[in-house]
Image (tube, coloured by chain):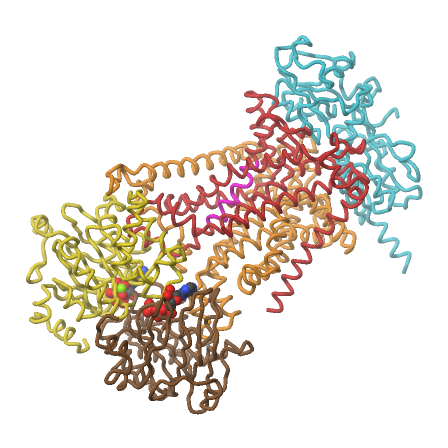
Chain colours: A cyan, B red, C orange, D yellow, E brown
Amino acid sequence: SKPAQEETQQQKLTITGASTIAPLVSVLGKKFEEKHPGTRIDVHTGGSARGLADANQGLADIGMVSEALTEEEKKGLKVFLIGLDGVSIIVNKANPIKSMTSEQVKSIYTGKINNWKELGGPEAPITKIHKAEGRSTLKLFLNYFKLDNKFIKADTVIGDDQQGIKVVAGNPNAIGYVSIGSAEYEMSQGVPVKLLALDGVEATTANVANGKFPLMRELNLVVKNSPGKLTQQFVDFAQNKDNYEIITQEHFVPPTKH
Amino acid sequence: MYLLRIIAAFVGVIVVFILVFLMMESMPVLNQVGLLAFLTNDSWNPGDKLYNLTPMLVSTVFVVAGAVVVATPLGILSALFCHYYAPEKIAHFYRRLMELLAGVPGVVYGFWGLMVLIPLINRWHPPGSSLLAGILMLTLLIMPTIALIADASFAGIADEYLHGAISLGLTRSGTIFSLILPIARSELLMGIILATGRALGETMIVLMVCGNIVQIPDSLFAPIRTLPANIALEMDFALGNHRSALFVSGLLLMAISLVLVLLAEAIKDN
Amino acid sequence: MSKKTANSSENLALKNPFELGYTFFLKNPVNQKIVYGDILLAIVVWTVAISVTAIFLCICADLVIHGLSKLSWQFLLSEPENAGREGGIASILVSTLMLLIICLAVAVPLSLGTAILLAEYTSKNHWFGRWLRISLDMLASVPSIVFGLFGNAVFCIILGMGFSILSGGLTLACMILPMLIRSMEEGLRMVPDEYRLGAASLGISRISTLINLLLPAAVPSLIAGLILGIGRASAETAALIYTSGYVDRMPQSWLDSGRALSLHIYDLSMNVSGGDSNAYASALVLMMLLIVIDSLASWIGRQWLNRRLQY
Amino acid sequence: MLPSKTKFKTSAANAQLSQYYLLTDQLSLHYGSKPAFKNVTLTIPRGCITALIGPSGCGKTSFLCCLNRLTDLIPNCSISGQIFLENLNILHPQTDTTALRRRVGMLFQKPNPFPLSIWKNIVFPLREHGYHDREEIEQIVEEVLKDVGLWNEVKDRLKSSALRLSGGQKQRLCLARTLALKPEILLMDEPCSALDPISSAIVEDLIASLRGKYTILIVTHNLAQARRIADYVALFWCEEGTGKLIEAGSVEEIFENPQQPITAAYISGNRG
Amino acid sequence: MLPSKTKFKTSAANAQLSQYYLLTDQLSLHYGSKPAFKNVTLTIPRGCITALIGPSGCGKTSFLCCLNRLTDLIPNCSISGQIFLENLNILHPQTDTTALRRRVGMLFQKPNPFPLSIWKNIVFPLREHGYHDREEIEQIVEEVLKDVGLWNEVKDRLKSSALRLSGGQKQRLCLARTLALKPEILLMDEPCSALDPISSAIVEDLIASLRGKYTILIVTHNLAQARRIADYVALFWCEEGTGKLIEAGSVEEIFENPQQPITAAYISGNRG
Ligand SMILES: Nc1ncnc2c1ncn2[C@@H]1O[C@H](COP(=O)(O)OP(=O)(O)OP(=O)(O)O)[C@@H](O)[C@H]1O
Ligand SMILES: Nc1ncnc2c1ncn2[C@@H]1O[C@H](COP(=O)(O)OP(=O)(O)OP(=O)(O)O)[C@@H](O)[C@H]1O
Ligand SMILES: [Mg+2]
Ligand SMILES: [Mg+2]
């Protein structure tokens, strides 16, 4: 009865990893379950690092990683891109500033500019919101602006994007960087934040999708080099164009071009 | 009796297990860099093998001490209100309220702090996320614990003492300060310790309202990062020594509470 | 006594609702000065009570304003959809209740047993009691996330329960042990010695004394501990992420993963953009659930108390 | 106290206010719906010792509790009728009960020292009543403890818990604590019940020495004692579970010339 | 009890075991380091009523508590010496205390009914002792309540809380609850202290009627009562804060021909 057992084992997939992707994968999982009755997709969070580790050790069938993998990390794993997430600077809606250059962002975060006045805004100290150690958004941000985390002088360190949006919404002098998709959605809901154009490029999901906006991260699923049948099925399902609608719904960008 | 022994031993084993788990997880980094590194390194930067926890330790102590100092009188006064001031119906309502407050998830408090309290403080003294916000929100979190335990202990005070006090013509305040609080002393102390523990270990609220900047606060309005917030912020992304170092934060928290508990025992014995 | 405990709020409480709990212009018999302390304390107590209520109502109002529109039977009875932004919380409610059941079913007997041993069978200075008490107090300050990782390591992996309601419940049980044990123990210690002496002199065994006299007399503290424990368990998020998991499907068994209500609230408000209104509604449901559970707990306690008076 | 028992109308009672110090008029007390005693009309003259006697459960303790409104604290307890202390309407809802209880001290049947040290048991009520001078307090403590014959027994352990005293010692401590406050009226519920003949005699002498300075109402089961120290005696009796006042009068009248057959039977020791 | 007070050596005591029922040998009790009483050697004959008298605080209650090992439950309390109940070494650590306390019933000085209903106060210990037949239990309850004269007062509210009884009623309830268990030995600490003469007489008659069936040790401050009901009397005294046994003997010896001057003074009512 060994094959039968294998069969039943294959009915269940365990997916762990980045909390950013988890809601998306849950929704995908539900849809997959509907299409394949009798299967079960269990999604758990715990961070990208965890996703990688679990996938490597076989604790999970699939790992979720919310950043591009380094060559070393890729060893022994197959990586499937399922979406993109643009990251941009946000400020409170009351802030008159509309765009920013990379230099300005850099100066603000290293403490060279401390007052909005210096950027042509009102006389008010800048409240800088920064991400916590290890987050993929942070790595992306540091890489892009060529900053060293040690020299950044932040006023508030946050964990999740939503927290950043809420802080900025409540503080007219705050600046932060969050997922463009989430920010767009919140703006549409009337939350008083706005996305700044970066180096002249409007921060919109459209610009992320067409590759114009430079600051973005990958949303990946990783699996062992020899995935099981169901695993492969699910990964294919997640990458399927039919499901791009779901990805958009979750305020991410489908990986059209990439 | 034997059953009880077995149960208690079981509980003891669980406690030991958790301690051992913490120790084991923190061992690698402790072996490599030693305990002292956590107090003397230049900064907290596990990526560069710098593990200074002192600022977070100090911040944690500040925020918890602040919360306990504010919440203890509030909690005890609340319980007094239920027992000796409020008419029965109001007391009943108030008690239900405390019970509810005791079960509100940290996220909900944190959320409220984020949306209401922080903008308020920000208007007064930016950036808003601060030691003060942490103290206020933690106060809200632990006050019901103290209030409920105090309430239960007041309920346990025999009527005959109250009757005695009343018939001596003592005022309410006199009865409370000289009789009720001394009688309930040991329970109140226990309540405070439990509440302190809860505040020490609380993650979500401080994570959301304190600002999470690693520094020794120089004022009430300075943002801080506490040890549990540190664990929660970085655990998901930490590997190897970094992860281990986070468990050391956990050990350190227990050390703080050990000091507190021993202190409380000393007070009680005197 | 039972009357007293049931009505304990009546102790010194007012008969006259218009009296605010202090005596107007009471003169000191010796120096004939008006006693201000009493008035002051009354004012302070009422102020505290009113402001605490006000703050609480603020939070509540916040929840109600944002959450009430979403709240309906539909919301309670349907499954979450679209990562929880839409749909209801039926499966999450069930998971939460299952978690609480496991947690309490494990923690209550353990802590009751330990509290009894500590309070009735070991002297206050016995080494075992002393150490257990100290380590429990220490345990109370361990961050919940560490409990989560502990539970993950022990229950999920070593004991092979995987991400499941069972391992989540057990982890919660470990977490609330200190709270339960310590308050129950102090409650038992508060019971006057005369009952113990009286029972002993009638040749009543200690077990029976405990069940019939001491535990009922300690009911207020037992309930307080229980309610604190329930509160803490139902408010927990961090520990559950690593143990009972994130899956928001209706759990089929104790070994299924299931998402707790507080975790759902956390995820919706912190991780899912556009989840706020459902987060509010879920928080509202959690509060109502707590009201129900807490009332149930004290009702059971009081029932037990009253049973003693029966024939 | 009136030589013969008379039931006043309220108006009549008011007229007598100046003459009689403490006065109850048609006082009844119910626990729930069960009456503990009914229609007790009694006057207690100033500066005298009045003894309440009667069988167990006839409402003596309940009666005392009315006089300082301690009944407020007993759930389900309701009073009807009137009580006047000079011009003060004790049962009026607006009466300041704390002030009243400072005037009317009470000693309980079951001694209830606070679970504090012996010293604190006496000193903390004193402080509350406005004594702050350390020396004066020390002096008062010593004095009252000597008065009740407890000083020698406890002088070297004033700081130890009052719960570790023997039964009689507790009773004397409670008496001392009440006396230290010097209330106008002293209600004593069996102050000598747990005392040996020697201590009992000391307390009795003490009570007798307070005559004139305080108004004392004492419940006692010891008829000989009542006869020795009381000026007036009131006999309660239990009829169908409800207490009532049978007869009241001066000690000679009651003991030598009782008007009611029940009284005669009770004082002669025959069973009712 | 020996006609004249004799101090046994332990060996001598053992020899007398069969003759004397309950026997203490050089019994001392300390609370912490403070002795409550010292070197009490006393024999209590089977089936007789022995009265303990003495001033307040001289260790009578403490002495009673030793006899059923209730002292085990009192913190800081240590005993030295020996107590034998027939062949049972009471103070031996291996003695089954629950069984012992079933043989040796005790009534406390301060009545301590359980916070249960009146009915349950009696029935709960009965059930514990193995009575399960409902009818038998009902009969026993009625019988003991009648014995202590409480039946008429409480028969229509057996289900209400025992804490709502009057002082004397509580005391009688506690007595009833102890009697219901029919222990071999009854230790009674001032069973009549809160009782009026009538109830007191009822209880006294009851105790007297138990003579021969039970062995009774009664603490009383009422010398007349001791004289009326006791067969033997033991006088405790307090010297420098420590209790000791002054004299013990038959009631006639003590009251008519006391050997010790203290005894003579005490029974004549002069102050020691
Ligand atoms: N709290 C209470 N609730 C209900 N009934 C009570 C309460 N207290 C006393 N009683 C009942 O009221 C009656 C009178 O009680 P009270 O204590 O006044 O008697 P007493 O005269 O003091 O008797 P004793 O001499 O035994 O102390 C008794 O029948 C008693 O059972
Ligand atoms: N738990 C205790 N701890 C310390 N000392 C105690 C304790 N109980 C009693 N004592 C002391 O021991 C002595 C003897 O007390 P005990 O109760 O035996 O006296 P007693 O003869 O019963 O007096 P009474 O007639 O007043 O009841 C007293 O001086 C008392 O203060
Ligand atoms: Mg009485
Ligand atoms: Mg005694």
Q: Is residue C204 above or below residue B183?
A: below
Q: Does D133 sit left or right of C81 as displayed?
A: left
- Horizontal and vertical percent position of residue E50: 34, 82
Magenta span: chief secondary structure: helix
- Horizontal and vertical percent position of residue C31: 25, 39
- The reply to whether the magenta stretch includes residue D220 is no
Residue at image x 81%, y 45%? Answer: A14
Q: Does C143 sit left or right of C39 as displayed?
A: right
Q: Does C67 sit left or right of D107 as displayed?
A: right
| Frontmost residue, A2 versus A192 | A192
Q: Quadrant of the N terminus of chain B?
A: bottom right
- Horizontal and vertical percent position of residue C142: 66, 45
Residue at image x 81%, y 27%? Answer: A217
Q: Is residue E242 above or below residue E235?
A: above
| Frontmost residue, C243 versus A203 | C243
| Frontmost residue, B212 versus A252 | B212
Q: Is residue D117 above or below residue A255?
A: below
Q: Which residues are magenta?
A: B138-151
